[in-house]
Image (spheres, helix red, strand yellow):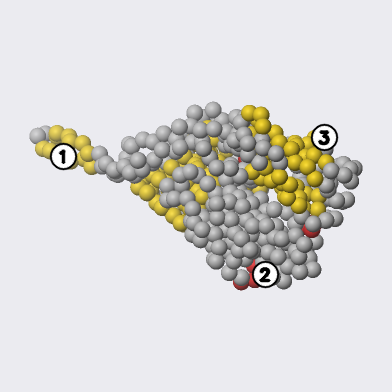
Amino acid sequence: MFGSSMRTRRGWLAVLGAAVLVAMPAGWGQTFSSTSTGADGALDYTGTPAGTVIIFDPATHQPALDVDGDNVYHFTTITIPANVTVKLTAPKLNYGPVYWLATGAVLIDGTLDLSGEDGHAEGVSATRTISLPGPGGFPGGVGGSADSPASQGFGPAGGTNGLGGGYGTPAAFSGATYGNVFLLPLIGGSGGAGSGTVGQFGSGGGAGGGAILIASSASIRVNGTIRAVGGNGGDRSVLGPGGGGSGGAVRLLAPRILGTGSITTERGFAPGGYSNGGGQGRIRLEAFRFDSVPALTGVSRVVTLSPQAIFLPTSNIPSVRVATVDGEAVPTDPTGSFLLPDVVINKPTQLIMTIQAKNIPLGTTVQLRILSQGGADQVWTTNPLAGTVANSVADASGILPPGFSRCFVHATWTPQ
C-alpha cells in the first residue's frame, strides 16, 4: 500500500547505424499530482516588510479561504520570502491539522511556524491558562495548588504529574509514543502536564507542535525554516517546572524537493535544566528527486520514490465551544482574558452553560474545566450531545464564584 519502485527511464536512438544509449536522470519526467484545484489562487507574501510576523487567518484573508472548514487549501503557488514569518495557530484553524496543496512551486525562504505555546509561569490564578498548540496538536495542562490539582497534558501521550508529552519519541519518565513513519493519520504533538506547588499555583505544561502536509505538483524548496516545535514547560515552581510539549508533524510531497534550510519538530524543554521535557515529533519527505535535503530535527524519513497518497480528511474538523453562559451569547472568537471578559453575568446561584459541537458523535459528553480567581478549580460535565452530528448542543450547570472565571472546554470520544 505504501511501497513503490523507482524507475530510471531510458531511450534508444539510432544514429548512422550506431546504437546510442541515452540515460535519463532518476525522477526526470515523472509526475505527481498534489490534487490541488488551484481554486484558492497563489499564497504569496512577496513584498512583505522584513521582520513581519503574519498570523495566517483564513477568515480574514482576501478572498476568504477554506469556507467549508476542512483545513484543506487549494493553492496555485506558495511563497514565503526571507525574513518573513507566517504563523499558524490552532484557534484560527479549528485546532485541526493543515493541508496546503499547490499546483505549482512552493518556496519557503522565510519561516513557517506551527509551534505550541510555552506553559504559564507559577503565580496567582489570574496568570493560569492552558497553553495552546499548533493546529493539529494538543494543549498543555495548567499548574495546580494544594486546593486545585495540576492538570495533565492533552493528547494521545499527554504528560502527567508535571512531566512532558510524548510523540515520535517518549518524553522523559512520561508520555508514550504514537503515530507511524507514514504520518497517517496526520496528527500533532501532545501537551506537557502542569506542576504543583504550595502557597501559590504551579507552572503550566507546554503545548504540542502542530501538524502540516504540504504537497506540490512541481517542487518544494525550503531555504528557510519550517517549525512545529513543542512548547517549553512553564518556569520552575517549588515542585519543579511544567512538562514540555512534544514536537509536531511535517510531511512534504513533491516530484522534487530541495533546500538548504531546516525543518524541526523539536521537543519542548523544561526550564532550569530539569529533565521533564517532551518527545520529538515526526518528519517525512517524499519525492522522486532530492537536489538537497534541509536539516531535519525530529524522527525523520526521507523517501526517494513516487510520493504516496495524501489521504485528505473525509469530513469536516470536529469542534466544540461554549455558546452561551446563562443565556448570554459568547463571542465566536473569545479571548479568555481576565482583563476584559467575554461575558458579564450577575448570578450567585446555579447557572447553565450551553455547549455547541460540530462533527462530534451524538451522545458524547463534554467537560468544562473552570479556573476562577475567587475559588477552587471546577470540572463541569454536560448531558449527552443531542441534535445532529453536524450541529449538536448540550448543557452543563454549576455555580461560579464572584470575580473572573476562565473556562476551557474539551470532548473525548472513540471514533466509530
The residue at 14%/34% (across/down) is 15
Q: CA distance from mark 3 to mark 2?
A: 41 Å
Q: Is residue 206 visible?
A: no
Residue 366, quarter of picture? top right
Q: Which mark is residue 20?
A: 1
Instruction: Identify the amino acid type marked 2.
Output: Gly
- Mark 2, residue position: 240
Q: Nearer the viewer, mark 2 or mark 1?
A: 2
Q: CA distance from mark 1 to mark 3?
A: 82 Å
Q: Earlier in the sequence, mark 3 or mark 2?
A: 2
Image-based side of 344 in relation to 208, left or right: right
Instruction: Identify the amino acid type marked 1.
Output: Val
The residue at 81%/53% (across/down) is 372
> Is residue 185 or residue 288 the one in the foreground?
185
The residue at 58%/56% (across/down) is 158
Q: Is residue 184 visible?
A: yes
Q: Earlier in the sequence, mark 1 or mark 3?
A: 1
Query: Where does the N terminus fall, quadrant-wise?
Result: top left
